[in-house]
Image (tube, rainbow, N blue to C red):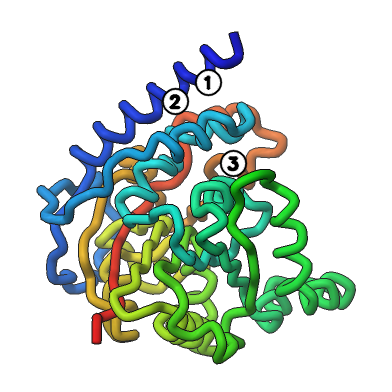
Amino acid sequence: MEKSLIALITSIIAAISITGCESGNQTASTAPTQSAAPMQSMAATTEPSQVKQAPASSDLASILAAQPEAVIARYPSRNPQQTLEFFGIQPGMTVVEALPGGGWYSKLLIPYLGNEGELVGANYPTGMYKLFGYDDERLAKLANWPTDWPATAQTWVEGKAAPVSGFVMGDLADSKKGTADAVLLIRALHNLARFEEQHGFMSRALQDTFDVLKPGGIVGIVQHAAPSDADDAWASGSKGYLKKTFVIEQMQAAGFEYVAASDINANPRDLPGANDVVWRLPPTLAGSKDDEARAAAMRAIGESNRMTLKFVKPAI
């Protein structure tokens, strides 16, 4: 019975993946100029893609099907198979994952990359966590993150598993430079952008991203997307949202080539107002602790509207 259920889930995931990749991709285009006009509703744009997608992987589908029910329940919002295939992530690659945290994506990547690949976690610098209000005890623990997190991550998967290592953004070792096939920046850019003007965190993180990649290496970005006509100050990262134009401009300034966009992770129901933050939505539901009606309204919207962008480091 269990094997039959896993087989059924696997076939459903594979079918959804093929449909999503055929309908969700966009052609790379020149970034439009940002506007500071009042916010209006923003639905996902769709354009035909010229980027060939990797074929659906039965291995990845099986890994996805084997995850706990709570993880599988978020697939319609996070679309992990379609997302990884759009970025071109393949077994045997060395992949850097920014802010891996508790391992939602890591637990998929470690078995998928396999023992011929490698997963490298990249965390925010300690100085950023100070700005989040972390106390001295939590900051002291973060000092050991580059060794503690990989040790924990290695316990998440048995069998054919990629080795795991870690580093802190802004402190990339020379030995790591030019070693990665791909970097995944999944919901990681808004805080870097938020503190860029005062502390330069985003510039240093993108420099590390460029340096760690091999020539021709991939950068995959999933980021909460601000409406295109949102006020620039509102869309600076402190609310969790960034404009697509801003992200493209920052990546191009850092030396990357823009390849394509996809609406795989778009949610046109997410229409934030001037006083809204992304954390009002699931899974956080900030501001809804004692207001079930508000919580229900936020659940009806679902997780945030997200841009999905692919870049490459130019080949030498």
Mark 1: give few (<14), some (14-19) or many (20+) Cα within 10 Å: some
The answer to whether residue 187 shows anywhere in this view is yes
Q: Pointer 3: what residue?
A: 283
Mark 2: give few (<14), some (14-19) or many (20+) Cα within 10 Å: many
Q: Residue 69's x, y, as percent?
A: 61, 27
Tell me if residue 282 comes above or below residue 87 in the rendering. above
Nearest the camera: 146 or 110?
110
SS type, badge 2: helix
Q: Pointer 2: what residue?
A: 10
For marks 3 and 2, the one nearer the N-term is 2
Q: Residue 221's x, y, as percent?
A: 39, 62
Tell me if residue 236 comes above or below residue 298 in the rendering. below
Q: Quadrant of residue 37?
A: bottom left
Nearest the camera: 25 or 111?
111
SS type, badge 3: loop
What's the residue type where badge 2 is placed? Thr
Q: Quadrant of residue 295?
A: top right
Give how far apart the Cα atoms at labels 3 and 2 are: 25 Å
Q: Residue 299's x, y, as percent?
A: 52, 32
Residue 86 appears left or right of 101: left
Residue 252 appears left or right of 199: left
Residue 126 appears left or right of 207: right
Give how far apart the Cα atoms at labels 1 and 3 are: 26 Å
Instruction: Tell me, yes or no, whether the two marked residues, 1 and 2, touch with CB atoms within 8 Å.
Output: yes
Q: Which label sits on residue 6?
A: 1
